[in-house]
Image: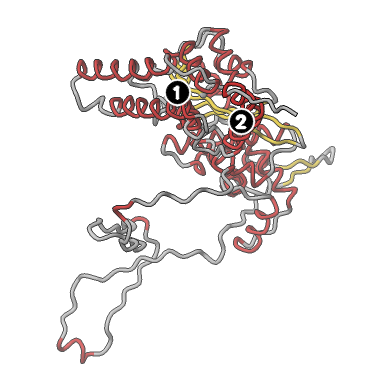
């Protein structure tokens, strides 16, 4: 029996036929592993999705050094609380030596060593009884009462300031009605049923309607608006919380809960003739808004950088090298951007143009790999909407300002598990808007709630969330 001898070319062909499918499967599995390993640093996933965070890489130069002790560090300026001014001090107790033997050797000075102490009062509320005299008609016998003040009738059992406290606990402190009820009973000494608390929060919700609508009207007139959205649960349905942030201490932040995540929400709140800049991520709703009305956008670089970092985790060496080189050029771009106020404008313009061109040249020469080509496609279509921050000093390159203001909303969503109906949605929209805007403007949210509720009880105009309303 004769045996056939295979040529070297035939052997290689047989090996390729046998190992080709296996190598393709291995590459597919590696790509799947890289996708499953995505976290908040390599994708748009929230940090809360990072179940296990890898330990930080230890710097070799710091190995062997002792861990820094907690608290204030040597050389840091000591912080001391500013004492209460005299007009805020309610009581003064003077302590002096007693006995003449001490005073024979020591002279009393007109100075004191002072300790200011803050304490809760035994009773934290006062009860006012409003009595309306009854009058009877001498002929008909009809009985009527004298007129009570509007704020007394509207407020009922709970006055404006206590109503503001309950609303603040519900909105700012993520407290349930049961927890508020327990707090009022154990700490304040006031027994209130949960149904009464629901009515109080309802009054607070209605008191904020005018101030909220004022911001809705002002939003299309803003020159810069950062926009983002996150999920919102309601009775098993998934709604969307939209956030609109007009930056600056004189700006504001507006929240809206909607069943839709489409560009229709943008058209409703910003309008189809919006002339400002929209800062956002690369979600399809924003791109459709851009295509439909020709809006001016600033796409978020933080989201882009996370996508580029993902390229550096892939097994394909060509894609990985492309991602690493692109990250390096992006770092140089932002290094130049941070020098905007440090060098002459004409020199900075040239440096920024070189850094921009370096990024574009690298992106347009992206390797023929799916992930790299996706990055290239973004810049081929929307490069000017990524580099707009270089042209306009008032435009931020990221959408971080809006994302930071979603933190309270996300925490509230996780604690309360969402809303149950229309009234709950309107309450969340308005109280989140008040809390975020007051923090942005350096105002007291509790005081704003108190003023709004008092205006609602008395039928007066509500306070404004716009610092200088027309």
Q: Is residue 75 above or below residue 394?
A: below
Q: Residue at x 50, y 48 (%)?
A: 54
Q: Residue at x 57, y 30 (%)?
A: 255
- Circles 2 and 1 in contact, beta carbons < 8 Å: no
Q: CA distance from mark 2 to mark 1?
A: 66 Å
Residue picked out by circle 2? 23
Residue 470 percent location from the top left of the image? 44, 19
**Left or right of 328 in this view: 137:** right
Residue picked out by circle 1? 469
Q: Earlier in the sequence, mark 2 or mark 1?
A: 2
Q: Secondary structure at mark 2?
A: helix
Residue 198 percent location from the top left of the image? 71, 44
* Foreground disc of the pair 2, 1: 2
Q: Residue at x 61, y 32 (%)?
A: 230
**Left or right of 135 in this view: 52:** left
The image quarter in which residue 63 lies: bottom left
Crowd around label 1: few <14 · some 14–19 · many ≥20 (10 Å) = few
């Amino acid at each position: 029996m004769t045996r056939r001898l295979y040529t070297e070319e035939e052997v290689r062909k047989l090996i390729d036929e046998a190992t080709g499918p296996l190598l393709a499967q291995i590459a597919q599995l590696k790509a799947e592993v890289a996708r499953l390993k995505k976290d908040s640093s390599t994708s748009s996933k929230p940090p809360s999705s990072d179940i296990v965070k890898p330990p930080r890489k230890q710097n070799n130069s710091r190995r062997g050094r002792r861990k820094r002790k907690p608290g204030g560090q040597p050389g840091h300026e000591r912080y001391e609380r500013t004492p209460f001014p005299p007009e805020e001090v309610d009581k003064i107790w003077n302590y002096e030596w007693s006995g003449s033997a001490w005073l024979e050797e020591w002279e009393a000075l007109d100075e004191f060593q002072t300790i200011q102490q803050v304490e809760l009062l035994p009773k934290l509320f006062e009860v006012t009884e409003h009595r309306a005299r009854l009058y009877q008609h001498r002929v008909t016998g009809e009985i009527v009462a004298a007129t009570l003040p509007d704020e007394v009738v509207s407020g009922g059992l709970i006055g404006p300031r206590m109503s503001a406290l309950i609303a603040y606990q519900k909105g700012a402190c993520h407290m349930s009605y049961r927890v508020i009820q327990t707090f009022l009973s154990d700490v304040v000494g006031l027994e209130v049923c949960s149904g009464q608390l629901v009515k109080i929060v309802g009054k607070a919700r209605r008191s904020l309607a005018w101030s909220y609508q004022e911001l809705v009207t002002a939003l299309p007139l803003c020159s810069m608006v950062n926009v983002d959205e996150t999920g919102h649960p309601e009775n098993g349905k998934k709604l969307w919380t939209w956030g609109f942030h007009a930056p600056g201490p004189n700006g504001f932040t507006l929240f809206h809960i909607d069943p839709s995540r489409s560009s229709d929400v943008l058209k409703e709140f910003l309008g189809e003739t919006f002339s400002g800049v929209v800062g956002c991520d690369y979600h399809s709703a924003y791109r459709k808004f851009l295509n439909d009305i020709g809006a001016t956008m600033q796409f978020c670089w933080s989201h882009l950088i996370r996508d580029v970092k993902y390229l550096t985790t892939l097994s394909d060496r060509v894609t990985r090298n492309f991602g690493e080189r692109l990250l390096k050029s992006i770092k140089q771009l932002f290094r130049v951007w941070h020098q905007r106020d440090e060098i002459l404008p004409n020199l900075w313009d040239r440096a920024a143009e070189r850094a921009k061109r370096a990024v574009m040249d690298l992106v347009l020469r992206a390797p023929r790999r799916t992930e790299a080509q996706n990055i290239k496609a973004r810049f081929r279509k929307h490069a000017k909407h990524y580099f707009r921050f270089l042209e306009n000093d008032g435009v931020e390159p990221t959408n971080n300002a809006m994302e930071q203001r979603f933190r309270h909303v996300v925490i509230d969503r996780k604690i309360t598990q969402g809303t149950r109906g229309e009234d709950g949605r309107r309450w969340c929209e308005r109280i989140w808007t008040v809390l975020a805007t007051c923090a942005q403007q350096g105002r007291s949210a509790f005081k704003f709630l108190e003023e709004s509720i008092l205006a609602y009880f008395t039928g007066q105009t509500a306070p404004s969330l716009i610092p200088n309303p027309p």
